[in-house]
Image (spheres, rainbow, N blue to C red):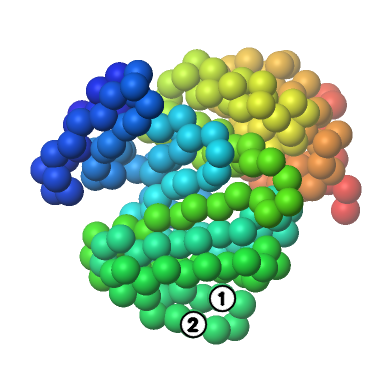
Amino acid sequence: MPLSLNRVIASPDVGRVVGMASVGWQALGFDEIQPISVAGVNWLPLRRQLGVEAFGVNMYLADAGELVVEEHTEQGLRHEEVYVVLRGAATFTLDDEERDAQVGTIVHIGNPHVRRSARATADRTAVLAVGAPVEDPYQPSAWEWTFGAQEFRATGDHDAALALLAEGLDRHPENPSLFYETACWLTMAGRHEEALDTLGRAVKGDPRCATQAQDDEDLAPLRALPGFPVSPG
């Protein structure tokens, strides 16, 4: 059942509840949300589904042996994070240490430099992730829109993906990763000149985008065009 802006009914798996966004609250079962496969994980875009603006909140699902939290740090965003194992079990890797986490385990990571990841050790594992910067007001991260666009790869819905990315650029003007992903979708839509111009804006903001573009299959049709960026080295 798709999420309604006015009425949300949770799945029987987690109990049946109704929420009315119009009166200031919502409730839903996470098993109702279609996961998006991206960056090696199955991501549930809770923050975007619910319209949360005060902090980041998302979920990840995995079966045993699968990655449930992708390896990353929060050095760029400076987010403090909390992970909660809601179902199943996982092993968290925090820098060079491992921690087994059963249902109910809470993992708090206050240092944004800690490299973190988690792998499920039981089927149907579900992990909730909450984060926000310590010192600055929270705003949704640009990666939510680049991740979200992957939902439309299976259907090839270029217009929907581009509309979502445009929404992200409204929130994060001049963001290189959003320009880069937009260039990919414009290329797949056959809008090559627009894609090349948008890719140029990505490279201007972050020269590393030029290196990534050299092997990106999405951008293959652009590589023969004049003006395709050259890798910086």
**Residue at x 51% of width, y 76% of height:** 93
Say which quarter of the image contains residue 152.
Answer: top left
Q: Amino acid at mark 1?
A: Leu
Percent position (x, y) of residue 160? 47, 19
* Residue 218 in sight: no
**Residue at x 61% of width, y 27% of height:** 168
- Is residue 226 shown above or below 191? below
Percent position (x, y) of residue 89? 31, 71
**Residue at x 26% of width, y 62% of height:** 87
Q: Residue 212's mark?
A: none
- Crowdedness near tag 2: few (<14), some (14–19) or many (≥20) residues, C-alpha within 10 Å: few
Q: Is there CB contact under 8 Å for labels 1 and 2?
A: yes
Under circle 1, the secondary element is strand
Q: Considering depth in this image, is 3 or 228 the residue closer to the camera?
A: 3
* Residue 51 in sight: yes
Q: Amino acid at mark 2?
A: Glu
Q: Considering depth in this image, is 55 or 89 the residue closer to the camera?
A: 55
- Is residue 230 shown above or below 197? below
Q: Considering depth in this image, is 183 or 94 the residue closer to the camera?
A: 94
Mark 1 to mark 2: distance in Å? 6 Å
Percent position (x, y) of residue 8? 25, 28
**Residue at x 46% of width, y 55% of height:** 129
Provide the residue designation for mark 1. 94
- Name of the residue lying farthest toward the bottom: 97
Provide the residue designation for mark 2. 98
